[in-house]
């Protein structure tokens, strides 16, 4: 499917639509009256209200069921499209009323869009590809969206509805259903674009870099790794909440806790902490109900296999489909997921050298410690490259928060200075 | 004659109850042989506190420490000198690690007797020449995967007039050519000789779907057969049921679902499972299956979902006596209309995994890696 000038075309033959694309974009950019953030916000708000009235339930309900998302959670997510949230987002990211004061020497400044954005979306959250385009629209960009494989049609539905509410947006949104293997077509999009917005794992980011011209800006929203940092002053209550977080998110989110670093150099301290946390994890698991059976089976076999392989560097606690593996090294790594955490020693004096090398993979650290040491540890974590330092609720969402340490709206913009 | 050879030359391939004692004897021989000849296997049994002498009665089979297929992907274990291996085969995983399994003369002999006996039982052996359409790889020296060998092996059950492959071997490697197969199918539908289609279910499904979209429907000659092998794993993404598949085959090729035979086997458990006319995989005399609880790994009763543990005394060269998959399945013991009273295995695969979405770095790759 293709979305072109507000029209949905049932075709996967892109070629004939591709040819005129660049000329169309130039024509749009030549227009003296470009779209405004207000137009985008009103259209989104109209969409949001219609969704809240249940008018999209026919499309939404089956999708929610498929991804096991509650209607309440859908409503919270839909609220991201409301006027209130979007205005707040713009104010936080771009400043109140989005105006920039002149510099001392009387030089005027104004924020402009980058121009043309090429979004390479990931399929892991429904609605995210469309949201990426909306961020591009809020900043005034022309957006070309490559749908992720297996897109269920939601993105085109959302965006064509927006255009119905605000027809001026029609020349600013192009959606193509091109498979990732068609590199020639993708390269054409990349050539036209001023910026490539890429969502996905390391492979997707590397692929985007390889197809981009050196002049093209790459804005990568890659996959991340998160962990918890615990000192002996952490309360049992906080640790239990961390265990609940691990069970709730099944460790699949960027912000999910993969493992726990303990501020110690003593193996016996680590061991007794591991045993304590294993009990809490079992309790949280019982409270939340067990994870998917296929995943539990897969992990039970992996842990059984680890035992056969007779590794001397770890101690495994496993029962009821959850596990805690105490390891001797201090490497930050992915866990087995689905309620299987690693626990490693990491004394605070070694924090920066251990964590920093993971650079752009770093995201959240759930810091569980005493009040008096919190500032010191948070400073270390921040200097090591962590961008979100939370308590035990590592996946919390707050309006106005940055995305992986930066504001997308600024990433999609540039500052133009005008003398005199 | 060893108990294993007796078992693999047993006349009726689904007489499970009558072969329980023989199966136990063959397993006793097999486990002892591996214990004495594979130091790694002996270490694992010792660590698990199990000795071959502990295998006294039929119910003790469940106590044999199983080896996960994952272990074979990371460790090569041979219980005979490597020079005595006549064939080496790898699992067909496209990403991740592959298992390397080798077969010596006695293991191959048993495998051959098993295949002949099963194919005779399922009436797959015919003297009438046929055209083969193979939805898989053309054999080549550089492709050691077992599936290539078994699909080629399947083309020996009836004299071959021709063999056409979906994946043709060229100088630049394998190339998918479905157009040629479509033309061949149209031509063969006019022939008086039957067609036998065989290969990966995913390719077969893809071909049939394309033909349907293009409006190509043929009626293949009487006696034509479609056999599918290589696992249903590739299907999960397409979300189709077997029933839809059979209906598609009937519509596009005119092959009745009675003439659609499915095979299932694995490098780490080279017993052949052939579905009956009700499309059930009955357990043949050559193996036993234990379904285990996903958390405790204890056996669960028939009808319950769990991990599939496969047992066979077929192979002397690698300790495959009891292997553990990471797939879910159910062993059914209810009566099957086909008349075979051996229980049948329903493979569920890794339920749920297809729907999992994640943004944790590396997680997608880890979850989607096809390890078989």
Image: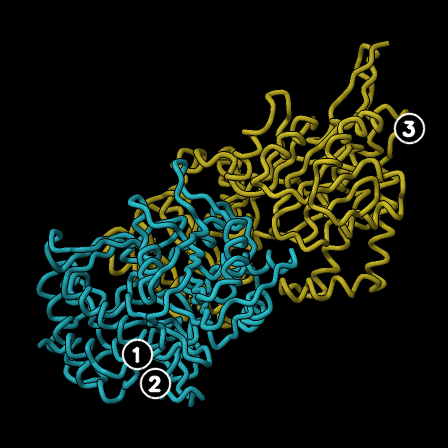
Chain colours: A yellow, B cyan
The answer, for residue A287, to whether it is visible in the render is no
Query: From the viewer's perspective, is A22 left or right of A46?
Result: left
Q: Position of residue A340 (x, y in %)?
A: 42, 59
Residue at point 22%, 72% (across, down): B113
Position of A227 relative to B344 (above/below): above
Q: Which mark is residue A33?
A: 3
Is disc 1 in the same subunit as disc 2?
yes
Position of A361 relative to B102 (above/below): above
Residues at marks 3 and 2, CA–CA distance in whole angstroms? 76 Å
Pointer 1: what residue? B284
Residues at marks 1 and 2, CA–CA distance in whole angstroms? 7 Å
Element type at marker 1?
Answer: loop
Residue at point 81%, 48% (across, down): A160
Q: Position of residue B262 (x, y in %)?
A: 42, 70
Q: Position of residue A91 (x, y in %)?
A: 79, 37
Is disc 1 in the same subunit as disc 3?
no
Residues at marks 1 and 3, CA–CA distance in whole angstroms? 76 Å
Closer to the observer: label 3 or label 2?
2
Q: Which mark is residue B342?
A: 2
């Amino acid at each position: 499917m293709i979305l072109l000038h507000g029209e949905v075309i049932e075709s996967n033959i892109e070629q004939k639509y591709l040819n005129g694309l660049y000329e169309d974009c130039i024509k749009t950019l030549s227009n003296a009256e470009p779209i405004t953030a207000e137009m985008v916000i009103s259209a989104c708000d109209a969409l949001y209200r219609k969704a809240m009235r249940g008018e999209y339930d026919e499309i939404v309900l089956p999708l929610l069921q498929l991804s096991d998302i509650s209607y309440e959670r859908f409503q919270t997510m839909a609220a991201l499209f409301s006027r209130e949230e979007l205005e707040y987002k713009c104010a936080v990211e771009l400043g109140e009323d989005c105006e920039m004061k002149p510099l001392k020497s009387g030089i005027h400044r104004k924020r402009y869009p980058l121009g043309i954005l090429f979004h390479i979306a990931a399929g892991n959250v429904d609605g995210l590809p469309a949201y990426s385009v909306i961020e591009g629209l809020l900043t005034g960009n022309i957006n070309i969206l490559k749908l992720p494989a297996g897109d269920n049609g939601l993105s085109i539905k959302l965006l064509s509805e927006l255009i119905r509410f605000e027809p001026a947006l029609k020349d600013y949104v192009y959606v193509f259903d091109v498979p990732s293997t068609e590199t020639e077509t993708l390269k054409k999009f990349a050539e036209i674009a001023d910026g490539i917005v890429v969502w996905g794992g390391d492979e997707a980011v590397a692929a985007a870099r390889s197809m981009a011209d050196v002049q093209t800006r790459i804005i990568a929203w890659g996959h991340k790794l998160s962990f918890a940092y615990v000192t002996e002053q952490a309360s049992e209550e906080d640790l239990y909440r961390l265990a609940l977080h691990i069970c709730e998110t099944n460790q699949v989110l960027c912000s999910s806790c993969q493992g726990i670093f303990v501020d110690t150099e003593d193996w016996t301290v680590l061991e007794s902490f591991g045993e304590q946390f294993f009990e809490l994890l079992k309790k949280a698991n019982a409270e939340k109900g067990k994870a998917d059976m296929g995943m539990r089976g897969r992990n039970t076999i992996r842990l059984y296999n680890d035992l056969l392989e007779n590794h001397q560097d770890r101690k495994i606690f496993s029962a009821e489909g959850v596990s805690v593996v105490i390891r001797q090294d201090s490497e930050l790594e992915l866990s087995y997921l689905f309620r299987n955490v690693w626990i490693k020693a990491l004394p605070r004096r070694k924090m920066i050298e251990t964590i920093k090398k993971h650079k752009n993979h770093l995201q959240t650290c759930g810091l569980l410690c005493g009040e008096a040491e919190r500032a010191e540890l948070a400073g270390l974590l921040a200097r090591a490259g962590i961008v979100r330092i939370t308590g035990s609720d590592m996946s919390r969402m707050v309006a106005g928060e940055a995305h992986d340490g930066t504001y997308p709206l600024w990433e999609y913009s540039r500052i133009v200075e005008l003398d005199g | 004659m060893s108990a294993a050879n007796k078992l693999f030359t047993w006349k009726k391939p689904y007489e499970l109850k009558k072969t329980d004692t023989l199966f136990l004897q063959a397993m006793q021989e097999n486990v002892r042989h591996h214990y004495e000849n594979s130091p790694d296997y002996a270490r694992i049994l010792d660590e698990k506190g199990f000795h071959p002498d502990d295998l006294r009665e039929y119910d003790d089979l469940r106590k044999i420490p199983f080896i996960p297929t994952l272990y074979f992907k990371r460790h090569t274990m041979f219980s005979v000198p490597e020079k005595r291996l006549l064939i080496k085969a790898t699992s067909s995983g496209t990403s991740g690690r592959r298992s390397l399994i080798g077969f010596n003369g006695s293991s191959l002999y048993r495998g051959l007797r098993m295949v002949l006996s099963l194919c005779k039982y399922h009436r797959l052996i015919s003297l009438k020449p046929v055209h083969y359409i193979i939805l898989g790889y053309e054999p080549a020296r550089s492709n050691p995967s077992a599936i290539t060998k078994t699909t080629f092996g399947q083309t020996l059950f009836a004299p071959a007039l021709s063999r056409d492959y979906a994946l043709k071997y060229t100088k630049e490697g394998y190339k998918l050519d479905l157009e040629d197969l479509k033309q061949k199918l149209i031509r063969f539908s006019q022939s008086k000789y039957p067609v036998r289609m065989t290969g990966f279910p995913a390719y077969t499904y893809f071909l049939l779907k394309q033909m349907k979209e293009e409006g190509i429907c043929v009626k293949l000659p009487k006696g034509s057969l479609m056999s599918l092998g290589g696992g249903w794993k590739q299907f999960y993404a397409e979300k189709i049921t077997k029933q839809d598949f059979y209906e598609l085959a009937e519509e596009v090729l005119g092959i009745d679902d009675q003439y659609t035979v499915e095979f299932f086997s694995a490098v780490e458990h080279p017993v052949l499972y052939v579905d009956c006319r009700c499309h059930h995989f009955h357990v043949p005399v050559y193996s036993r299956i234990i379904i285990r609880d996903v958390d405790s790994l204890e056996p669960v009763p028939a009808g319950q979902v769990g991990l599939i543990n496969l047992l066979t005394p077929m192979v002397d060269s690698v300790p495959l006596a009891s292997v553990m998959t990471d797939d879910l399945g159910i062993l059914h013991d209810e009566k099957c209309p086909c008349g075979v009273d051996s229980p049948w295995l329903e493979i569920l695969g890794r339920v749920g995994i297809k729907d999992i979405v994640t943004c944790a770095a590396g997680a997608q790759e880890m979850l989607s890696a096809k390890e078989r």
